[in-house]
Amino acid sequence: MMIDRDFRMLIGGRLVPGAARLAVENPATGDIFAEAPDASPADLDAAIDAARGAFAGWRDTPIEARRKAIVALAGRLIEEVEPMKRLLTREQGKPHKDAAEEVLGAASWLKAAASLDIPVTVNEDSAERYSETRHVPIGVVAAIAPWNYPLILASFKLGPALLAGNCVILKPSPFTPLTALKLGELAADIFPAGVLNVISGGDALGPWLTGHAGIDKVSFTGSTATGKKVMAAASDTLKRVTLELGGNDPAIVMHDVDAGAIAERIFWAAFGNAGQICIASKRIYVHEQVYDALRDALVAYARTVKVGDGADQGTQIGPVNNGLQYERVLDLIRDARAQGYAILTGDDEERTPGHFIPVTIIDNPPEDSRIVQEEQFGPVLPLLKFGDYEEVLARANACEYGLGASVWGADEEAAWALAERIESGNVWVNETRHLSPFAAFAGHKQSGFGVENGEAGLLEYLVPKTLTRKRRL
Ligand code: NAD
């Protein structure tokens, strides 16, 4: 198999080119370097028919065989890490090192999910009656992934959905379809035909999928605005939904930190993957006692960081993935400039063929500014000054999102006490973004609905079934 060409969909165990094609751009150069299939409604129907046809067989396949198949897919990914890494960088933009970590991360996530057990609860075991609650698969799952982590976020869904005994239709973003299509190709002879299908297409494909009566569950990762549309579309046939959505994560830096020592970690909390991470730190609240020191250390470090083509050696931050997001981020920077906020690093007028935006740090803009209130999802960061912990907690929590947050402080107990009061599904102390395939990951408020990862994430792909038996007729 050639990882870098010949991109086809996996439908009913066959690799199909689709009638129409979708251009895929390298965000570092602006070049169209590949074409992916642009699925038609007939392609979608074929995938859903295949999945429905395969469901009973896969559901009744012993769980040990299902585990083995998922682990085999992880193994294939590991074998192909080098070409998959290069492909991921070309379609997504991230540096090769980060791309390799994503490929291997997806493999380890699959393996971890495959090791989970499906719980059975005995409700009653008496002379009179026996009752247990099992968890059974839902049917056909639509797994919809965004463009920032196309492989690892797909793996969050595939492992538990398939282990649970569901069949899956994976739909990647039109901006990053290629690695997902190759994942499908790697899986083609591992799973029975129809168990895993991968389809790519343009903007119409997502709504077709979520509105299709043949889908029983939608597992979606993407923006909050799209998540609301997915939920509305799911209501018609009462599809189950899991939504992992946007965030505007606060980081609170306490008065007792050593600013010089943490600056680099804070920098990467915000600018990793060019800021295109749902759980990137997107608002940094810094205590006034350490504000100047941290600001200066961040700016000094930012000047050492190499922004460039992810395929070039030494690149630490790649381009923004696509033109739409590039314009969105530039718009926020231009607004900050128009409002007269102090911009410490970065220059939005720097133009190259790719979607490059220099690391941009904004000095203490007002709390109600767009750059503080909106999810930037790009390499621009507001630093905000505070003096009172109750006040900063209120500012951190005054947000429609509740995905992640972090607190940084030498007094761990004091930091933990603040962390306990932040309204978010994930709060870290003295680090950020640590995720485990065994720990629940869930967004509060408008950051999500439902859970991924761990047993709670697995249960999202199952429905409870309680069986009760009277001991005597
Ligand atoms: P997006 O919502 O534009 O697209 C996500 C996916 O949904 C893509 O595959 C897209 O083609 C598809 N889609 C678009 N419209 C649809 C519709 N009406 N119905 C069904 N599917 C549709 O998001 P994006 O721009 O790709 O990703 C960035 C956003 O994702 C950010 O807000 C980020 O915070 C969020 N995100 C969240 C998590 C998380 O785990 N909570 C992880 C990564 C990204």
Image (tube, rainbow, N blue to C red):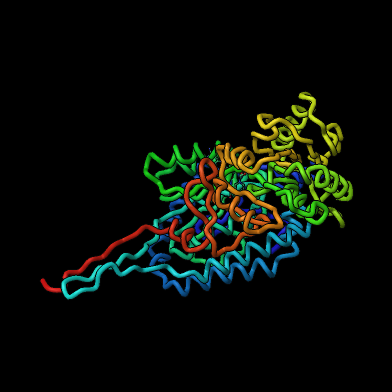
Question: Is residue 204 at all visible to an observer of this figure?
Answer: no
Please name whichever residue, 339 or 288, is drawn nearer the observer in this view of the structure: 288
Numbered-mark total: 0
Drawn side of residue 320 relative to residue 393, left or right:
right
Drawn side of residue 253 relative to residue 237, left or right:
right
For the point 66% across and 59% down, the residue is: 412
Q: Which of the 4 quarters of the picture holds residue 127?
A: bottom left
Q: Quadrant of the N terminus?
A: bottom right
Q: Quadrant of the C terminus?
A: bottom left
User: x%, y% of residue 41?
Assistant: 50, 42
User: x%, y% of residue 172?
Assistant: 60, 49
Q: Which of the 4 quarters of the picture holds residue 411?
A: bottom right
Q: Quadrant of ligand 1?
A: top right
Drawn side of residue 68 relative to residue 384, left or right:
left
For the point 65% across and 44% down, the residue is: 250
Drawn side of residue 57 relative to residue 19, left or right:
left
Question: Is residue 124 at all visible to an observer of this figure?
Answer: yes
Question: In the rendered view, would you say 418 is above or below 459?
Answer: above
User: x%, y% of residue 121?
Assistant: 34, 68
Question: In the rendered view, would you say 407 is above or below 195?
Answer: above
Please name whichever residue, 254 or 97, is drawn nearer the observer in this view of the structure: 254
For the point 69% across and 38% down, the residue is: 376
Please name whichever residue, 98 or 184, is drawn nearer the observer in this view of the structure: 98
User: x%, y% of residue 461?
Assistant: 44, 57
Q: Residue furthest left?
A: 473
